[in-house]
């Protein structure tokens, strides 16, 4: 959604439309998980080391998306504060806001959604976007790569901490 809002495929491409291999990898991973003979891929996914590795990879991808959306918004909309913060946050939510909205409208989801009651997804995406924007583009304390490293480190640390402690570690104030 954030890539579509930026309206610049050269700067922020929609992942599935960027390369043919991405769609093929998604389909193969889905097939292997659900239909591989013997179900060993699904069983392997339940092993703690494999699950932790997948969560770390997802954290790295999320951090990259947040940081690149912030950088693209600053480049395309210079001087506008809302653009990098909103687009970086939307990029880091990974479609969660849209899925919640569609699920609620279809009657599948009865409780509060991510937008009205922000959880880890929205809070961490907003925190990453804010850190990248303030430390790289406003104050210039970090380079873009250093900002990316900081956001990756925070997301991976949270991912590993929740996996190792089995606690729900959120950025919630209450």
Image (cartoon, rainbow, N blue to C red):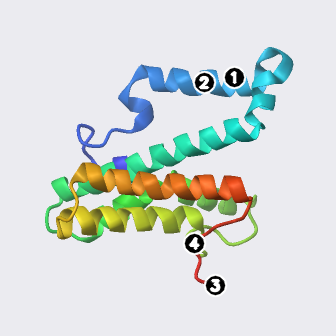
> What residue sits 47% from the left and 26% below the top?
22
Residue annotated with mark 3 = 174
Mark 2 lies on a secondary structure that is helix
Label 1, label 4: how many angstroms apart (C-alpha)? 32 Å
> What residue sits 74% from the left and 71% below the top?
111
In the foreground, 48 or 42: 48
Mark 4 lies on a secondary structure that is loop
Q: Nearer the viewer, mark 3 or mark 4?
A: 3
Label 1, label 3: how many angstroms apart (C-alpha)? 41 Å
Give the percent coordinates (x, y) of residue 157: 53, 56
Q: Are marks 1 and 3 in contact (CB under 8 Å)?
A: no
Q: Earlier in the sequence, mark 3 or mark 2?
A: 2
Label 3, label 4: how many angstroms apart (C-alpha)? 12 Å
Query: Residue reaching furthest top?
Result: 37
Residue annotated with mark 1 = 31
Q: Are marks 2 and 1 in contact (CB under 8 Å)?
A: yes
């Amino acid at each position: 959604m954030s890539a579509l809002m930026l309206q610049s495929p050269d700067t922020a491409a929609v992942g599935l439309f960027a390369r043919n291999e991405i769609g093929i990898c998604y389909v193969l991973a889905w097939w292997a998980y659900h239909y591989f003979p013997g179900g060993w891929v699904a069983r392997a996914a339940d092993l703690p080391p494999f699950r932790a590795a997948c969560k770390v990879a997802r954290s790295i991808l999320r951090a990259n998306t947040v940081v690149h959306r912030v950088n693209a918004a600053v480049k395309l909309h210079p001087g506008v504060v809302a653009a990098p913060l909103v687009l970086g946050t939307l990029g880091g939510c990974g479609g969660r806001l849209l899925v919640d909205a569609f699920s609620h409208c279809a009657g599948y989801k009865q409780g509060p959604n991510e937008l009205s009651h922000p959880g880890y997804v929205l809070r961490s995406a907003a925190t990453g976007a804010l850190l990248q924007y303030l430390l790289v583009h406003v104050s210039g304390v970090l380079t873009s790569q250093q900002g990316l490293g900081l956001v990756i480190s925070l997301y991976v640390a949270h991912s590993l901490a929740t996996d190792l402690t089995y606690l729900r570690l959120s950025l919630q104030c209450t």
